Image: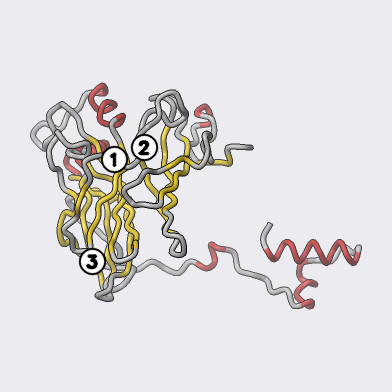
């Protein structure tokens, strides 16, 4: 229940009258515009665009230099959209305005070899400030088959699933938004066999509590390859972990797969 609805109902109950919402404006209750009515036209020259790449999952922060820094996933369009799970890399782009246009500067988290847990793919970046450094959360993966190329972009369903199942959340550290970024040897959040989050950890959404220094980290996982994707929450007092789950159960779940809808809803409903 929002503030406007609460005030409206309180007045109706106390007076016992079926006052219309227009009459409530006489009591000093302003009519608030709907969210859709607050949206302003988007700039035609804004955002981050590259004709050669798919651009996905951006995260923007204002730097000490007064510029706006975007970290986003990208992969070549010629490889096909589904190759995000094998070929994505996290790129750093900069703009003078939060709406852009953004210009790519460098690849912040490139491939670094299949021997690393995040050596073949980096995706879903989220950038936050933590004391005197920046934390770049993301998921990475590795796999044992050849990396798709424009000349040979085909990936079997088995291999695609293998790469997908290796998704793990990690964090990189830097004193500057321009890097270099220090990456960890291990993910900060692993799946838990036998639990609802047994398969992957991905889609990190961190929030830093500036008063306590705690980091709340929302993430996505599932109990099996064909199970619904659910959302959980973990907390840490150190960016490198350990991250402890706040609950044994997911905090959100999606609508049943039979509905063809993967939007999250309250797990208790």
Of 54 and 199, the residue lying toward us: 199
Circles 2 and 1: CB distance less than 8 Å? yes
Quadrant for the N terminus, please. Answer: bottom right
Q: Residue 203: which quarter of the image?
A: top left
Separation of residues labelled 2 and 1 (CA atoms): 9 Å
Q: Nearer the viewer, mark 2 or mark 3?
A: 2
Which label sits on residue 201?
Answer: 2
Separation of residues labelled 2 and 3 (CA atoms): 28 Å
Total count of labels: 3
Classify 70 as above or below 154. Answer: below
Residue 111 placement (x, y as % from top left):
15, 43
Which label sits on residue 225?
Answer: none
Classify 93 as above or below 137. Answer: below
Which label sits on residue 187?
Answer: 1
Of 232 and 26, the residue lying toward us: 232
Q: Nearer the viewer, mark 1 or mark 3?
A: 1
- Mark 1 lies on a secondary structure that is loop
User: In the visual, does 133 lie left or right of 217?
Assistant: left
**Of label 2 and label 3, which has the lower sequence position?**
3
Residue 264 placement (x, y as % from top left):
51, 41
Q: Nearer the viewer, mark 2 or mark 1?
A: 1
Q: Give the residue displayed 44% in from the left and 26% down from the top.
A: 223
Circles 1 and 3: CB distance less than 8 Å? no
Q: Give the residue displayed 79% in from the left and 76% down from the top.
A: 27
User: In the visual, does 242 lie left or right of 30?
Assistant: left
Q: Give the residue displayed 23% in from the left and 25% down from the top.
A: 159
Q: Give the residue displayed 28% in from the left and 70% down from the top.
A: 63
Of 248 and 22, the residue lying toward us: 248
Q: Residues within 10 Å of mark 2 (few under 14, many from 20)?
A: many
Of 70 and 37, the residue lying toward us: 70
């Amino acid at each position: 229940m929002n503030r406007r609805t609460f005030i409206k109902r309180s007045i109706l109950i106390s007076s016992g009258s079926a006052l219309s919402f227009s009459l409530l404006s006489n009591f000093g209750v302003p009519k608030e515009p709907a969210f859709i009515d607050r949206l302003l036209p988007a700039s035609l020259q804004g955002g981050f665009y590259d004709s050669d790449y798919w651009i996905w999952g951006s995260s923007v922060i204002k730097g000490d230099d007064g510029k706006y820094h975007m970290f986003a996933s990208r992969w070549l369009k010629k490889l096909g959209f589904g190759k995000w799970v094998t070929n994505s890399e996290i790129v750093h782009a900069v703009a003078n305005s939060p709406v852009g246009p953004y210009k790519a500067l460098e690849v912040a988290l490139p491939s670094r070899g299949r021997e690393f847990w995040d050596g073949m793919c980096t995706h879903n970046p989220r950038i936050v400030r933590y004391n005197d450094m920046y934390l770049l959360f993301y998921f990475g993966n590795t796999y044992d088959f050849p990396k798709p190329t424009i000349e040979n972009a085909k990936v079997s369903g088995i291999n695609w699933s293998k790469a997908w199942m290796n998704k793990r959340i990690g964090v990189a550290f830097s004193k500057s938004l321009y890097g270099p970024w220090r990456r960890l040897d291990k993910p900060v959040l692993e799946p838990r066999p036998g639990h609802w989050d047994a398969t992957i950890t991905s889609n990190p959404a961190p929030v830093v509590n500036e008063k306590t220094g705690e980091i709340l980290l929302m993430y996505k996982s599932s109990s099996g390859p064909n199970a619904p994707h659910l959302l959980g929450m973990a907390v840490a007092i150190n960016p490198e972990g350990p991250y402890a789950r706040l609950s044994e159960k997911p905090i959100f779940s999606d609508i049943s797969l039979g509905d063809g809808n993967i939007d999250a809803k309250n797990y208790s409903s």
